[in-house]
Image: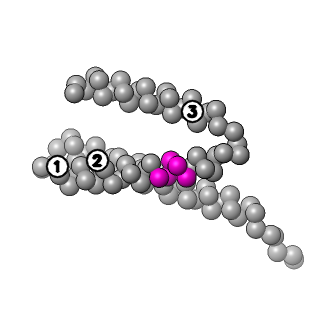
């Protein structure tokens, strides 16, 4: 596959993802975040596999490490936001 073909798929997926996430009602943000965390977990597994199979330190391994970094940020950020949202539902202690 050529790099132009892969780049066009990436750009189209960015547009589709943006418009799909924009049309979600606020009540569905938490389930959507859970799905994106699951997808990021799959990305990390694929990136680890690609990095392990790469021979030498080439573009494949560099892109895999970048994918691992950004997917990890997404997962940990999702957990942090979920934790803050759950904290809103706890009863406040009386002074």
Location of mark 2 (residue): 64
Image point 33% across, 27% down: which residue? 7
Q: Which residue is mark 1?
A: 54
Residue 52, x across and y down, in percent: 20, 55
Coordinates of residue 43 in the picture (x, y in percent):
37, 49
Percent position (x, y) of residue 30?
63, 51
Q: Which SS type dominates the magenta stretch? A: helix
Q: Which residues are magenta?
A: 34-38
* Horizontal relation, residue 25 to residue 71: left or right: right
Q: In screen coordinates, is 86 left or right of 91?
A: left
Q: CA distance from mark 3 to mark 2?
A: 26 Å
- Say which label, 3 or 2, has the lower sequence index: 3
Mark nearer the N terminus (1 vs 2) = 1
Q: Residue at x 50, y 29 (%)?
A: 16
Alpha carbon separation for disc pair 1 and 2: 9 Å
The answer to whether the residues at label 1 and label 2 have Cβ atoms under 8 Å apart is yes
- Nearest the viewer among 81 and 31 is 31
- Is disc 1 surrounded by few (<14), some (14 to 19) or many (20+) residues within 10 Å? some
Q: Tell whether position 37 is magenta.
A: yes
The quadrant holding residue 22 is top right
**Residue located beneath label 3 in the image:** 20
Mark toward the viewer: 1 or 3: 3
Does 14 sit left or right of 95 as displayed?
left
Which residue reaches farthest bottom? 95
Within 10 Å of the Cα at label 3, are there few (<14), some (14-19), or many (20+) other Cα atoms?
few
Q: Which quadrant of the rendered structure holds the N terminus?
A: top left
- Of labels 1 and 3, earlier in sequence is 3
């Amino acid at each position: 596959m050529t790099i132009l073909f892969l780049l066009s798929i990436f750009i189209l997926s960015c547009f589709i993802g943006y418009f799909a996430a924009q049309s979600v009602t606020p009540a569905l943000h938490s389930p959507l975040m859970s799905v994106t965390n699951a997808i990021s977990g799959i990305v990390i597994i694929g990136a680890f596999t690609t990095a392990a199979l790469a021979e030498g330190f080439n573009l494949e391994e560099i892109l895999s490490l970048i994918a691992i970094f950004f997917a990890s940020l997404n997962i940990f950020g999702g957990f942090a936001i979920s934790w803050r949202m759950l904290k809103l539902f706890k009863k406040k202690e009386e002074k």
